[in-house]
Amino acid sequence: GEDVEQSLFLSVREGDSSVINCTYTDSSSTYLYWYKQEPGAGLQLLTYIFSNMDMKQDQRLTVLLNKKDKHLSLRIADTQTGDSAIYFCAPSPSGYSTLTFGKGTMLLVSP
Amino acid sequence: DGGITQSPKYLFRKEGQNVTLSCEQNLNHDAMYWYRQDPGQGLRLIYYSQIVNDFQKGDIAEGYSVSREKKESFPLTVTSAQKNPTAFYLCASLLGTADSNQPQHFGDGTRLSIL
């Protein structure tokens, strides 16, 4: 099955850029999602990328996909304290299938 | 407003007791999922259902049971056989259209603790 790895913790200063990395093993993953979880809450879909794309930009968020290396990254520009949360990478072989989640990266943004 | 409702938000279980967590969605989604979240463990899939009256085991189904009698409801029972039930439980749903990408949508979770 799919194995997903993320670094567990990232600390940045407000206004800096944050880059959260993810590696996965299943080359058939077609859709790759990023979710955000604030304390005590459910998961909120942030963005996603199709496997036939290299990059997707959505306001302050940029997703980069290196399909050959099975590496996905999420860049948050001008990081704000409200961005402090846990971020999950979740590849899926199709939109109808189950997701495999990484352990999540806790982003801490200091003023 | 459409969404996924999980209840209760907090639940306490005594030793040897079964408890049921509720998950209801009014999004007309076909598929529903239950995940367990432990600190530092990410999300692990317990059960999922792609259609009414049918469900499949996920990675950690032992000690849990589900039913899917209605499209909008997918309750999870944590049985006494689950020896370490303390966790945050998340329910999700998915439209299930095969022709387009549809992400999973999540409820706000139920935190279960042992008394």
Image: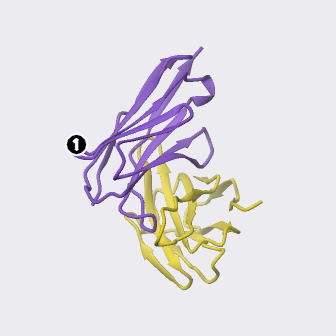
Chain colours: A purple, B yellow
Q: Residues within 10 Å of mark 1 (few under 14, many from 20)?
A: few
Taking the view exactly as shown, the residue that stands out farthest to the left is A68
Number of marks in the rendered image: 1
Residue at 57% from the left image edge and 34% from the top image edge = A59
| A17 to A38, vertically: above or below | above
Q: Quadrant of residue A84?
A: top right
Q: Is residue B3 left or right of residue A97?
A: right
Residue at 51% from the left image edge and 25% from the top image edge = A77
Q: What residue would you read off at disc 1?
A: A69
Q: Is residue A25 left or right of residue B25?
A: left
Q: Is residue B94 left or right of residue A73?
A: right
Q: Where does the N terminus of chain B fall, quadrant-wise?
A: bottom right
Q: Is residue B75 visible?
A: yes
The amino acid at mark 1 is Asp
Please state the horizontal and vertical placement of residue B22, each as a whole percent of the image. Answer: 66, 67
| A20 to B107, vertically: above or below | above
Please state the horizontal and vertical placement of residue B60, each as a whole percent of the image. Answer: 40, 63
Q: Which of the two residues, B89 or B19, is positioned nearer the viewer here?
A: B89
Q: Which of the two residues, B100 or A71, is positioned nearer the viewer here?
A: B100
Please state the horizontal and vertical placement of residue B88, each as a whole percent of the image. Answer: 55, 51
| A86 to B4, vertically: above or below | above
Question: SS class of the residue under badge 1?
Answer: loop
Please state the horizontal and vertical placement of residue A29, each as a whole percent of the image. Answer: 32, 57
Residue at 58% from the left image edge and 58% from the top image edge = B105
Q: Which of the two residues, B90 or B85, is positioned nearer the viewer here?
A: B90
Q: Quadrant of residue A98?
A: bottom left
* Chain letter belonging to callout 1: A
Q: Is residue B81 visible?
A: no
